[in-house]
Structure formats: C-alpha cells, structure tokens
Image (cartoon, grey):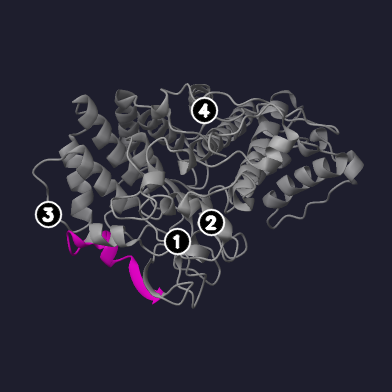
Amino acid sequence: MKKNKNLLFVFFAALLVFSSCEDKLFLEPEDSLTPDVVLSSAALAEGALVGAYGRMRSDNVFNGTTQLTQDWMSDNINFVGSFPTFQEMRDYTTIASNGSVSAYWRDHFFVLASANFLINKLPDAEIPDLEDSERARILAEARFIRAITNFNLVNLFAQPFQVANGANEGIPLVTEFFEGDIAPFQLPRSTVNETHAFIEQDLLQAIPNLLESTSRGRASQGAARALLARLYLYTDRFELAADFANQVIQASEFELAADYSFYNQDDASEHIFQIINNPVNAQTTGQGYSGLTNPADVARGDAPYSQNLLDAFAEEPGDLRFTLFNQEGVDAVQGTQTFTTKYPDAVNAADNAPVLRVTEMYTIRAEANLRTGLTIGDTPLNDINALRTRAGLPNLANVTLDIILNEKRKELCFEGHRRMDLLRNRLPLRRPGMANEAESAFGADKTILPIPTSERDLNPNISQNPGY
C-alpha cells in the first residue's frame, strides 16, 4: 500500500478538518505538516482524536451500510435495490472485485490509520499544555476506536470463532502508523483468536483511562465494557459476557429507556455509544441507514422489511417494536413494501447511528446466563420480560435460547446484529423457504466477504477466503 508525501498531508489535513468547528485552523505548507506539527498542542491532539471519530462516520464503517448489509445477508431485510454489488452480497454471489466490499475494507483501514497515528505518536510527543491524564484518555479512546473497528472487520471478512474454535484466518493486524513513501502493510492474516485477543487487550488497556461519563458519541468505560461483553458472547465465553453486560446495566450512566423515543437523541441513557450525525456531518446521501431504509419517494427504497421478519412480528400483534416503527411505501422497483422508521430523516440523512445500547446488554446477559445456568445480575426470564414489557407484550413464563434470539432480533432489527447472531449459533442466515437458504448455511463460503482483489494485488502475503 503506497503512501506518498501528498497522501500523508491529506491524512493529517483530514484529521484536523474533522476537529475544526467554530475555531479557524491555519495549516502550514504541506512539506511542514508533520506528526510534530499535528501533535504540537493539546487542542491539536484532541483534534486528531476527533478526526479519528470522524472517519468512523463513513457509511462503510459504522453509519449504516455495512450494518444493513448484514441484515440483508440474513433474514431481516428484503434488499430490492439496483446496486449490483449489494445484490451480490444478498444472493451470495459476491466476487473479490466487488467495489462495495473494497470500500468497506478501505474505509475501515482509514479509521485504523487514524487510531494508530495517535497510539504510535502521542506517547512520546512533546506537548507542554497536555496533562498526563488527558494524554492517557486520548490514547484510551484511540484504543477503543481501533478495537471496535477491528471487531467490525473480522466479523465481515472472517468466519466466526465457532467454525474452527478461532483457529481460522482473521484479518491482518496493523499496529503501526507508517510515514514516508512506502508503508509496509504487507502483513499476513492473523487468526480469529489472535484478532480477538488483540481487540480484548486494547479494550482492557483502555478502560482505566476512559471517562465514566461522556458524550454518547465518545468512548467511555461503559462502551469498552459493552464491546467486551459482545466479544465474549461471540467467542462463547459466556460467564465473562454476562459479567461485563451486567457491569454496564448496573452503571448509573446507562438505563433501559422507558419507551422508544431515544433513537435520535444524542444523550439518551439507552445509548452506550453511537455515531452522532447532523445535517452538516451526515450519512452519505443515498446510502447509510437513512438513504437505504426509507421509501423511494424520499430516498432509495432499497431495504424494506423481509416477509420473514414481518411474519415474526405478526406472531404477537401489538408489538411496539413494529407498530411504532413501520410505514408503507414504494420500493426501488415500484412495489409496495413495509419500511422501518428508525431512521426517518431521508432529506438530511442526519439520523444517529446506534452502535452499542443497553438493550443489547440485556439480551447478552440473558443468553449468557441461560447457557451457563447462572443468574449474574438477574435471571434470563426477567431480562427478556423487561424488554417485552417495554414493547407492550405480556410476560413469558419461561425462556429458551430460540426465544432470546427472537426477542433480540425484534429489538435490534435494522441495526446490523442478526447475521452474527445466527452464524455464531451455527445457524443458516436464511429461514426455510427463503431464497439462497443452502448458500447461507453456517460455514458456507460466501456468508463472509472476500479479501478485495485490490488489496491482494498490493499484498502478496494476504490469503483469500475459500470460494473466492
């Protein structure tokens, strides 16, 4: 992967542009815009961190496109749009030169470059006005950003832990920030276990120096613990998953919201971490959550409810998770479909993007406790009934794993969780009678994405996934 001096300048400039709000920012000529300049004051160091968060706003990272892709690769969304690259992923016919897949890979590594810049350069930077505690916090937030981005990548491009107990190939772990003309990114893929261990190390190292309470768009101790709970669930370490989910649930900064008005609130206590958008810094028009999930008269009309998800909600009429979040509209091919209203701002594409919220912690604690026979924090039955009460449904008398997964599906549909919940439970991504059921089986080649051809052209050491 080549980087010349102009590209290095663009990288630094991009970091700083994200951080400039009302204050004017004057840049030196590009030959003098070096890491020493970028990290020459506390304000600029903080600006570099804000720039890293800004890169997470890409639709191809955390602002909806990759999340919705995982819902239409499974059984939640009926993708009807005209993007051939998206149709390939829907139909399990993806090729390694798929342009959308290449963009997913590229934009994740842009985020990693921003995080690695801080992790590599900030510890030794001479910044007289930067307190030691603030330096440690910035580094901790950068580690969180690196961890959650690597986690997103490994889930997209590698088979889940359950395929080979984590001995299968994961992703290349880029830990350095490289300067100069050539960046030696020609790394082989680490295993899934090695990737998960690296993510875990980043999060555990970050927690002591993260703030307990901050904006929901910034990393906090609770956000790191919530991501660890998800990591432990995905790797069958259920007692740890229940413990960390419980720590988040018990934290005073977060609580299960009384109703569903939290979706586009910046600081609702339901949210642990989210991408906060606005009309100036928004999702890309036509993609992301807002562009893909709204009807064709106001957006693309690409991603309505699947019939299978509609049938799941129809089993218990009156479920507020459906009745409050659906509208009829015209889809991309002029048919009538049911669309979600979780992301209603089709004009500005400024809806916030949920990443971690308390609801997920209840489902993680319930599933992990059920699997272990423990009652860390509460019983699985009480956790699921708490979610059902908010949804306007009667309490259950007992719960099973299938019930927990079904409740989680309804709670988190259109938020990108369904694919991994099915794969890690060794289940096909499609239900009987749905298209491509055989191709969606656990461990099937194209339930994961290919390493992009463009990356393999640059990196002879990176192997391709089977079937591509």
Q: Secondary structure at mark 4?
A: helix
Q: Name the residue tied to disc 3.
A: 394
Task: Specify which label sits upstream in the sequence, 3 or 4.
Answer: 4
Q: Which of the numbered marks, if any, corresponds to residue 302?
A: none
Q: Position of residue 126 (x, y in %)?
A: 77, 27
Marks 2 and 1 in Cβ contact (< 8 Å): yes
Snapshot quadrant of residue 433: bottom left
Of badges 2 and 3, the one in the foreground is: 2
Q: Which residues are magenta?
A: 314-329
Q: At 20% from the left edge and 34% from the top edge, which residue is drawn?
A: 378
| Residue of label 1 | 79
Describe the element under mark 3 as helix, strand or loop: loop
**Disc nearer the start of the sequence (2/4):** 2
Residue 267 screen position, x and y as percent = 44, 52
Instruction: For the residues labelled 2 and 3, say whether their Cβ atoms are less than 8 Å apart.
Output: no
The residue pinned by badge 2 equals 86
Task: Tell me which numbered mark, 2 or 1, is placed earlier along the sequence.
Answer: 1
Residue 199 got which mark?
A: 4
Q: To which quarter of the image does residue 398 belong?
A: top left
